[in-house]
Amino acid sequence: MIALSLHKMLHTAQGNMLLDIALNVPHGEFITLYGESGAGKTSILRILAGLLDPDDGKIAINNDVWLDTEKKINLSPQKRKVGYVFQEYALFPNMTVRKNLEYALEKNQKNQIIDELIDVIELGDLQHRNPSTLSGGQQQRVALARALVQTPDVLLLDEPLSALDIKMRLKLQAYILKVHKKYNLTTILVSHDIGEVLKLSDKVYVLEEGKIIRSGTPSEIFTSHQMSAKFRFTGEVVSIQQEEVVYIVTVLIGNNVVKVIAQNSEITDLTVGDKVMVASKAFNPVIQKIT
Amino acid sequence: MIDWSPLILTFKLALITTILLLLVGIPLAYWLAYSKSKIKPVIETLVSMPLVLPPTVLGFYLLIAFSPNNSFGNWLNEWLGLRLIFSFEGLVLASILYSLPFMVQPIQSGLAALPKQLKEASYVLGKSKLRTAIKVLLPNIKTALLTGTVLSFAHTIGEFGVVLMIGGNIPGKTKVASIAIYDEVEALNYNTANIYSLILLGITFSILLIVYLVNGGYLKKFSR
């Protein structure tokens, strides 16, 4: 159980912003802090890990007090039992994969956990390589394993997958879920990827300008607001061709070229280069796996 | 036959200075790289002063400070038995101050260029600041350490003004190669001066060449 309440004035590029957060996370839960960049998500993780000091607040994990500004308690990062996975992996370049994990061992801790983690996160083939020779996804797997060596109660994931391509991301999501369950962790993920949030988390906290504006299960938060069978895109007309009695208008939407059938009346005021909206209502979307 | 003692003295001075500078320079560079203290700009300025100050100015003030005729020099002399003017110990101390920026600046910028997550990742893993510095930070700035070491060494070999001011010209004690060259030229022994000069030229050229080769990645094996 994590109980956290804190205030901190953050000085951002857009000016000052008050981070004002109160959270209770039951043991074993997987929660996500969701929101635009600059909303204060990463600051919360950093404060939890002791890497950033809040102006005032309290943090208690189970019955251990990590921070209580009133009682002047503030444990150093070294004394807080957390696993932290950074967005940029932060592997030690001067150590092999295995040495990175061994470095994380506590004094007198048996190194049997290392073989176990190498097994669980499937790093066997990589263990004697240097981090610089690994792909982003492989590096992040190592970072995940390293964060778990001390078997922390709390795992903090700071946008761990945002630098990875979609395939790698899916793979890592599976590893994250696996270790979350296997090691009975309380996990806090920072993410702005809705798919990821839906897949991984039990509960979502939506942050805006340093405050939690909504919270609930991922499906409560996202499905009603952002998913519907209504499509609307804007694009640019690339060409208009006549085919029998109808016209085919080719529209560039993002990087995709879309062909739309139009009636004579619809194209009268359309020319190539116009900005148009392509919209459709009440139809059944087709869903297909991307391979 | 030329007298080798100035050359030997020069390298002894450079070696001792460099070793002591590593011990002083690494903690100082670490502090400068990470401190948010208000006096940091002042310390940075002081460290960099020898880059722009005429060596004679530094030498002059050290001479005044260490002279047994004033209280500080007298205190050193009586309590620590250290007589820092016209002695080898004084040369070492003056050389440390004079070469300080050459050691501190590369290490400081090397540390500042490391991603801060490396340090933070180590702290979160429960490792102390000292352990993090020794196991994580310093091994990842090997080239900066090498640059600092070699530049300090080479710069100490090349010093003249400071040494002359505080050390004088005592054979076997403070007469280093650069002063011996000056001495020989004064005595019109161009041949001996030439030999000393050529040796210094060759050695400093090789030392600097090695640094650029290593830092440029031409010698892959050494540069991590």
Image (spheres, rainbow, N blue to C red):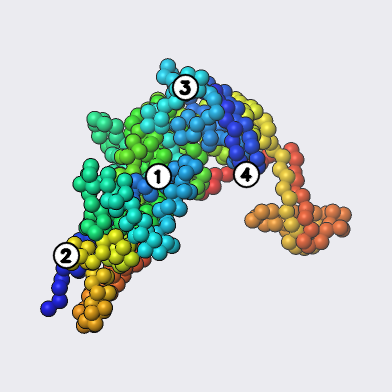
x%, y% of residue A238? 73, 61
Q: Is residue A105 above or below residue A251?
A: above
Given the image, on which type of amino acid does mark 2 rest? Answer: Gly
Given the image, on which type of amino acid does mark 3 rest? Answer: Lys
Query: Under tag 1, what secondary structure?
Result: helix
**Dot 4 falls on which chain?**
A
The answer for how far apart the CA atoms under marks 3 and 4 are is 30 Å
**Dot 1 falls on which chain?**
B
- Depth-wise, is mark 1 or mark 3 nearer the camera? 1
The answer for how far apart the CA atoms under marks 4 and 1 are is 28 Å
Q: Residue B172: which numbered mark, if any? A: 2
| A133 vs B85, nearest the viewer | B85
Upstream in sequence: badge 1 or badge 2: 1
- Looking at the image, residue B190 sits to the left or right of residue A4; the answer is left
Q: Residue at x 80, y 54 (%)?
A: A262
Q: Residue A13: which numbered mark, if any? A: 4
Residue pointed to by mark 3: A72
